[in-house]
Amino acid sequence: MKVVHFHNPGSPSLENELHLFAEKGIEYVRCMEPMTQEEQIRACEGADAVLTIVKPFPREVIEKLDSSVKCIVRIAMGYEIVDVEACSERGIYVCNIPDYAMEEVAVHQTALILACLRKVVYYDRKVREGAYDHVGYLEGYSARRIYVLSVGLLGFGRIAKNVARYMQSFGASVYAYDPLLPDEVFAEHGVTRVRTKEEIFRTCDIITPNIPLMESSYHIIDAEAIAHMKDGVIIVNTGRGALVDTEALLAGLQSGKVKAAGLDVHETEPFHDLDHPFMKMENVVLTPHIAFQTTESFEELQHKAVLYAIDGAMGKISAGAVNGGCVRP
């Protein structure tokens, strides 16, 4: 058996877990980026399972993969870089690691909310610029007491449940929209259930999307959604960049409709356009897609990725399979 790992510098190396492949008699091959699609396809020859974190697997690649490939494991929560439908047609299981950084992402999301509310980054810059010239120095938009505010969660999975708990501890009211869950889940967590995402837009002072990126959720926060939001809304995104329409968010910030934004993810990544208006906006907090990262989360991610790849190589359906019903032709 053979596992091929498409590795990018800076991404999990799996070094501490490679002994698990050896114990199962599985050959491990690491392929370093960059490489062309033709090189990618050749690298997969004879592979039983494939691991990737950044390298996309679109339909045109999947249709040409060696018939030996049984499983593709995305070493991340999301799996948008793999064409799941094309994989299902070929009987290839697609796995992600959906539960490795639940606490980390929720903490980072809460940190961005608090940074926007309390203007932590804003005032840090002002102090460093020498603007702090008297006690009680105030500038920019007004901060608010958290207990008078409402947080709106689009999606109520494991990350959102943690965010709800953290924000409730500060006294905020929490509303959530998730049509896939029964009423008792919301009641159990002391969260007000709403039946439409439009209710979140109309009702909440702080709004965060906590859902996978797919066709139905692409730009779930767009110009129309922002138009229906309360004046002075705060938008935070730690999910996927394309859940929020960048141009619509920019227009909302420029008009004042959106008071502040905290973004860990961006529609274009890496996001390093120094001329982009976000870079000059003091009411926008930017981090480099790092919400998932702690020492513990990386260890968990690597361990689960290797276990799922072993399952896939052996023809087993792992716990992380997103298309477990597919059948090999």
Image (spheres, rainbow, N blue to C red):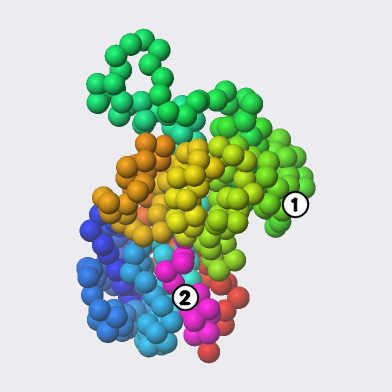
Find numbered disc 1 in the image and state the secondary structure of the residue it sits on.
Answer: loop
**Location of mark 1 (residue):** 195
Q: Nearer the viewer, residue 216 or 282?
A: 282
Quadrant of the rendered image containing residue 42: bottom left
Check the image and name the residue furthest to the front. 255
Q: Nearer the viewer, residue 317 or 253?
A: 253
For this view, does 192 lie left or right of residue 6? right
Instruction: Please state the horizontal and vertical placement of residue 31, each as a whole percent of the image.
Output: 24, 71
On the question of residue 81 being in view, the answer is: yes
Identified by mark 2, the residue type is Asp
Q: Earlier in the sequence, mark 2 or mark 1?
A: 2
Q: Verify whether residue 144 appears in magenta.
A: no
State the residue at coordinates (73%, 44%). 193
Q: Nearer the viewer, mark 2 or mark 1?
A: 1
State the residue at coordinates (44%, 72%). 82
Q: Verify whether residue 83 appears in magenta.
A: yes
Near mark 1 (Cα within 10 A), the count class, few <14, some 14-19 or many ≥20, is few
**Which mark, by number, is residue 164?**
none
The N terminus appears in which quarter of the rendering? bottom left
Quadrant of the rendered image containing residue 15: bottom left
For this view, does 127 lie left or right of residue 143? left
On the question of residue 293 being in view, the answer is: no
Q: Nearer the viewer, residue 20 or 293?
A: 293
Find numbered disc 2 in the image and state the secondary structure of the residue it sits on.
Answer: loop
Near mark 2 (Cα within 10 A), the count class, few <14, some 14-19 or many ≥20, is some
Q: Are marks 2 and 1 in contact (CB under 8 Å)?
A: no
Q: Which residues are magenta?
A: 78-93
Q: Is residue 270 above or below residue 137?
A: below
For this view, does 249 lie left or right of residue 290? right
**Location of mark 2 (residue):** 83
Instruction: Please state the horizontal and vertical placement of residue 306, each as a whole percent of the image.
Output: 38, 61
Instruction: Please state the horizontal and vertical placement of residue 164, each as a whole percent of the image.
Output: 60, 37
